Image (cartoon, rainbow, N blue to C red):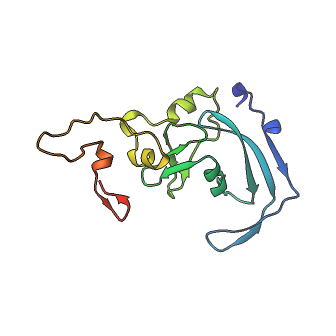
Amino acid sequence: MEEMEFDPDHEIQVDREVHKNFVFGNNEMSAGLGLSHVNAGICGQQMPIQAHLVEGATPFLLSSKFLYDVDATINFRRGIAVFRQLSEKQIKLERTPNHHLLIPLMAFAGNTPVVENLFVQKEEHDSMVASLSGEPKPSVAFHPDEDSTEFQGTPDESSETQGGTQVE
């Protein structure tokens, strides 16, 4: 962290006056110890993140508001996401043994090894994430079959749909 000039004493502040109450998955309740303000590196971008602190080994959880604000589209099965307000590139999320998805918070622009390994390679590209996130579709030349007046288009346009969901 030192080579990236990340000094936790300056990059993390805690407001101990904020004490939100939490109910966990096991129905236990706990009051937060404070609200932290962290300068994080996500997708090669520096950004401030707020997180409530609780006792124990609770992971750093990103809120649904944060995911909304960064325009996140996530394929939970494949662990691939795009955060359109930060980058148009798809990223590969890590998976814990309990199947939680993780994203490095130290992916600052200057942290080249982390940033380079974050983005999905072309062969891993997730077409469903691309479609849902509004990524432009690759163009396919239109060549109508001489015996047909049916539009050929891109594979996504000619795929069947069932109940509004694309079936592949």
Closer-to-camera residue (95/40): 40
Please report the residue visible at 57 percent of the width from the left and 44 percent of the height from the top: 103
On the image, the x and y values in percent for residue 85 come to 61, 41
Closer-to-camera residue (163/151): 151
Closer-to-camera residue (12/132): 132
Residue sitting farthest toward the right: 17
On the image, the x and y values in percent for residue 59 come to 65, 54
On the image, the x and y values in percent for residue 168 come to 29, 53
The answer to which image quadrant residue 39 occupies is top right
On the image, the x and y values in percent for residue 101 come to 53, 51
Q: How many marks?
A: 0
Please report the residue visible at 53 percent of the width from the left and 55 percent of the height from the top: 100
Closer-to-camera residue (12/128): 128
Please report the residue visible at 11 percent of the width from the left and 43 percent of the height from the top: 147
Image-based side of 51 in relation to 85, left or right = right
The answer to which image quadrant residue 148 occupies is top left
Image-based side of 93 in relation to 44, left or right = left
